[in-house]
Image (cartoon, rainbow, N blue to C red):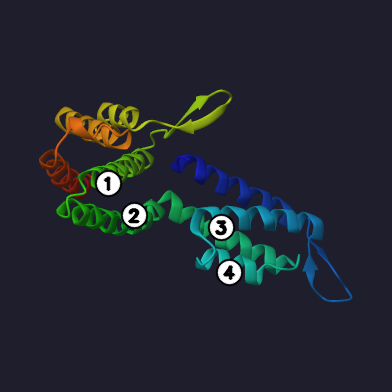
Amino acid sequence: MRLEDVTRRADELIGEATELLKTKKHSEMSGRTYVDEGSFRSVRGAILSFLLSTFGREHPYYEDVAAHAVVGYTSSLENAIGTMRAARDEIAGGWLIQIKTIAASEIFADFLDMADYLLSGGYKDASAVIIGSVLEEHLRQLCQANSIDTEVPSGGKSVPKKAEAMNADLTKAGVYGRLEQKNVTAWLELRNNAAHGKYGVYNESQVHVMYQGVLEFTSRIRP
């Protein structure tokens, strides 16, 4: 999902919660103000679902709403709205992408270390597949950071865009140049050969070159 779509969904949820807040009533018995409990639970559930899918269960935003917006009191709803506004500003400001990029970079480094280890042991084919997978995921993150679709319609549903198509789109958008595009194409072709058992059409030396190239590419051209 694109950054604009996530931000738009956050705005929609803030709007729904704000509209519900306008219906608040005061209880003489409890001295509290509250909104309709059924509507509150519906909005709360949608907000929790959004925060869970966007930030994760252990993020303070999710934990705050889960723990403090439990009953349909006005204060609970106001708390949820405040949390959503903070989350929305973080998303719109690009901080979410930066955090995920840092985490992904650490994961990529681990996988590339694994590929290097396998390659040093003579396992060129497994190494090529791992390097190619890291490259493809990096292309996907570059697309997401530059508002380029990573899915295409097919048979009435959306399916992940192929790596070479993302490579072409990133070049067209000016994220990197034609030389990088040609290099990425060559690396993807080598990965595909390894994945499809065409082990004789490339050698260990070429996988070494691929490893060094992808390592440099992912370090230099970042989301």
Q: How much space separates mark 1 and mark 3, taking CA atoms?
A: 34 Å
Q: Which residue is mark 1?
A: 126
Upstream in the sequence, badge 1 or badge 2? Answer: 2
Residue that label 2 marks? 104
Number of dots carrying numbers: 4
Q: Secondary structure at mark 1?
A: helix
Residue 177 in view, yes or no: no
Disc 3 marks which amino acid? Answer: Leu
Residue 12, percent across and down? 61, 45
Q: What kind of element bears circle 4?
A: helix
Q: Amino acid at mark 4?
A: Asp
Report how far apart the C-alphas of labels 2 and 4 lie in the structure: 25 Å
78 to the left or right of 30: left
Q: Nearer the viewer, mark 1 or mark 2?
A: 1
Q: Between residue 160 and residue 121, name the one nearer to us.
A: 121
Distance CA(mark 3)–CA(mark 2): 18 Å
Amino acid under disc 1: Ala
Asked whether, in this view, residue 196 is left or right of residue 15, the answer is: left
Q: Point out the tag, 2 or 4, that comes first from the N-terminus.
A: 4
User: What residue does disc 4 label?
Assistant: 64
Left or right, residue 75 beside residue 112: right
Gap between marks 1 and 2 measured at Cα: 21 Å
